[in-house]
Structure formats: structure tokens, C-alpha cells
Image: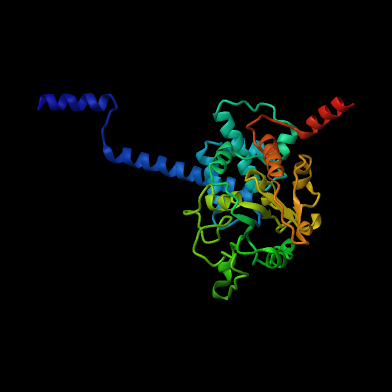
């Protein structure tokens, strides 16, 4: 009894206690606090995508969580968003930050990014490697995959008529929002994959945030297997597809600059790179010729200016050097 009593006094005097219940409550409180902080952080990232129409269900959350998982802090995001990338869309900002993060993680310093480097979209090295590992056998002539049936895409009014006139069984077409029309959707032709259950397409509408994938392999695979990718503007007179196409060594096709690649802030800097593309009018006489050398030139420029793989490059500097050399 004396031993027990002495031990009890020692425990009290030293302020030590071993109750399990309070510790469990503290852990729960800490967990709740962490969850609340994560929610705040997620909401701040999600705010980056507000007002962006060209997003599928759950895509903004997937990309926001990608940034968080990569360890990009709220401070880093705020600095980049405020000072550098304010003109970009949410997806462009997210991929730009992921690309920069991957290079820094690989030990490549990006201390003083050029003005051009802060202006154009950048793609992560992991995306480039994933696309390069896909099958590039060109089994399709033309390809399009994206939203068509929505009424808020004024720049795509020409798309269906071009598809009906030009696409054949060799081609690939999918309206990723076809299911919004349910049974009323009518296929445009044998090339139309819109009503199938396959996951092919650009950010399919039927994929929620928990099922959505970070890298949509089916979309990129359809492009790598195509010679030409039709790139109509969306809710604005430009599209991501135009410059994404260069990574797949396909050639983009647009109908007019007014509807598909207007000279606005989103496109002006990219246009300085000097990519080569086709117009729908180029196929008016039925001649469809794919130039692999053009595709290779575009691919080389994409790697140089739309990724950090070869460093921070500015095409205007290159043009100045070439001019001086010529002079």
C-alpha cells in the first residue's frame, strides 16, 4: 500500500498522467484542424478555375488536388497567380505550376523565368513522357474529341458541317457531351464514337471527380494516332487542342482565325513560336496530304517553348540572333 501511495504522489507531483481519452480527443482535434486547413487550401485552388467554361465535371477538383499532392503551397500558388499567370485559365495555371515543380524536383533551377516563359502555357515533363510512350501509328486521318452539343460554344458552329463533309470510316469523332441528349443523340456517321461506352474523348462528361484521371490517356492516344486534329474555338476564339496537337505530332486544322485562333492575349505569344497548321479550306478539293516533317518541326518547337525540358527559351531572342546572323 505504501509503495502504491508513494508512486501516486510522485505521479501527481510531477504533473504526469496517462489518461488515454484526452489524448484521443487531442488527436481528433488535430485531425479536424488538418482537414479544415485542407478544405481551405482546396477552395483557394478551386477559385483559380472560377468562370472557366471548358471544364468537365470534377476536373477542377482533380487538378487542384494534383497541385496539393505535388506539395505546391498556398503561398507559391498565390505568388504565381498574382504576379505571373493572371492572364491564364485555371487549367493553364495548374499545368504551368506542375511543370515548374517537376523541373525543380529534378534539380533543374528556374530562378528567373523570362517574361515569355511566364506568358505561354507549359506542360509537365511527365505529360510529355506519357504521350511519347503512346502508340503513334497514324490510323486516323482526322480526329476531333470535345464538347459540341452545348449551346455556349459559338465558335464551333462550322464543326459539324466540316465533319459530315470530310470525315470517313478512317476518322475519329466524339462529342463528349453527347450523353446530355440521351437517346435523342443522332450519330453523324460511322466515324462517330459519341454514343459508345468507351472512355475515349477529352475529359469525358461522365467522369466524376473521384473517377477522373489526371492524364486522360484515351484522349491523347486518339490524337497520337491521327494525322490531323480539328481544333475549333470554344466559348472563346481559341482552344487548348491547337497547341496540344503539336505534342502528338498531328497537325491542327482550323476554319478561320476569327473563330479559332484570334489575336488575343491567350494566343498572341504562342503565335510568336511560328507553329505550322492547316485551314479547312486546304482540304476543299479533296486532297489530304500529311507532312510528317511539318509535324516534327512543330514537335521540336513545342518541346522548346511549351516545356522546361530544354530550359527557359524565348522565340523572339532566337529570331533576333538569326536576324543578326543573316545581316
The quarter of the rendered structure image containing the C terminus is top right
Residue lying at 87% horizontally and 27% vertically, measured from the top left:
326
* Residue 176 seen in the current view: yes
* Residue 84 seen in the current view: no
The quarter of the rendered structure image containing the N terminus is top left
Q: In the image, is residue 7 above or below residue 232?
A: above
Q: In the image, is residue 1 above or below residue 258?
A: above
Residue closer to the observer: 183 or 225: 225
Most distant residue in the right direction: 327
Q: In the image, is residue 278 above or below residue 195?
A: above
> Which colour style is shown?
rainbow
Q: In terms of image quadrants, where is residue 303?
A: top right
Residue lying at 72% horizontally and 62% vertically, measured from the top left:
156
Could you tell me residue 67's position as x and y percent? 55, 41
Could you tell me residue 91's position as x and y percent? 63, 47
Most distant residue in the bottom direction: 184
Residue closer to the observer: 197 or 9: 197
Could you tell me residue 313's position as x and y percent? 72, 31
Residue 203 shown left or right of residue 243 in the figure: left
Q: In the image, is residue 65 above or below residue 14?
A: below
Most distant residue in the left direction: 1
Q: In terms of image quadrants, where is residue 184?
A: bottom right
Could you tell me residue 197's position as x and y percent? 49, 64
Residue 241 shown left or right of residue 19 in the figure: right
Count of numbered labels shown in the rendering: 0
Amino acid at each position: 500500500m505504501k509503495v502504491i501511495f508513494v508512486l501516486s504522489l510522485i505521479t501527481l507531483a510531477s504533473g504526469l498522467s496517462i489518461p488515454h481519452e484526452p489524448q484521443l480527443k487531442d488527436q481528433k482535434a488535430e485531425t479536424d484542424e488538418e482537414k479544415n486547413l485542407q478544405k481551405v487550401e482546396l477552395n483557394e485552388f478551386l477559385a483559380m478555375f472560377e468562370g472557366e467554361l471548358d471544364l468537365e465535371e470534377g476536373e477542377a477538383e482533380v487538378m487542384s488536388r494534383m497541385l496539393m499532392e505535388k506539395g505546391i503551397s498556398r503561398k507559391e500558388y498565390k505568388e504565381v497567380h498574382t504576379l505571373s499567370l493572371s492572364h491564364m485559365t485555371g487549367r493553364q495555371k495548374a499545368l504551368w505550376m506542375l511543370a515548374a515543380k517537376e523541373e525543380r524536383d529534378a534539380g533543374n533551377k528556374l530562378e528567373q523565368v523570362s517574361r515569355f516563359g511566364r506568358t505561354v502555357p507549359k506542360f509537365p515533363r511527365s505529360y510529355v513522357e506519357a504521350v511519347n510512350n503512346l502508340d503513334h501509328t497514324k490510323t486516323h486521318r482526322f480526329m476531333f474529341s470535345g464538347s459540341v452539343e452545348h449551346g455556349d460554344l459559338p465558335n464551333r458552329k462550322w464543326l459539324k458541317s466540316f465533319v459530315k463533309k470530310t470525315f470517313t470510316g478512317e476518322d475519329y469523332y466524339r462529342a463528349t457531351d453527347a450523353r446530355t441528349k440521351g437517346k435523342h443523340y443522332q450519330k453523324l456517321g460511322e466515324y462517330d464514337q459519341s454514343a459508345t461506352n468507351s472512355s475515349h474523348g477529352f475529359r469525358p462528361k461522365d467522369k466524376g471527380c473521384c473517377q477522373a484521371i489526371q492524364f486522360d490517356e484515351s484522349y491523347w492516344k486518339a490524337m497520337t494516332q491521327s494525322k490531323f486534329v480539328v481544333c475549333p474555338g470554344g466559348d472563346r476564339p481559341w482552344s487548348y487542342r491547337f497547341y496540344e496537337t503539336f505534342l502528338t505530332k498531328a497537325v491542327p486544322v482550323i476554319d478561320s482565325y476569327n473563330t479559332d485562333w484570334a489575336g488575343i492575349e491567350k494566343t498572341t505569344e504562342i503565335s510568336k513560336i511560328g507553329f505550322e497548321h492547316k485551314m479547312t479550306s486546304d482540304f476543299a478539293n479533296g486532297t489530304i496530304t500529311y507532312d510528317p516533317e511539318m509535324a516534327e518541326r512543330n514537335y521540336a518547337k513545342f518541346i522548346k517553348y511549351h516545356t522546361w525540358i530544354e530550359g527557359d527559351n524565348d522565340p523572339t531572342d532566337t529570331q533576333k540572333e538569326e536576324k543578326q546572323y543573316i545581316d
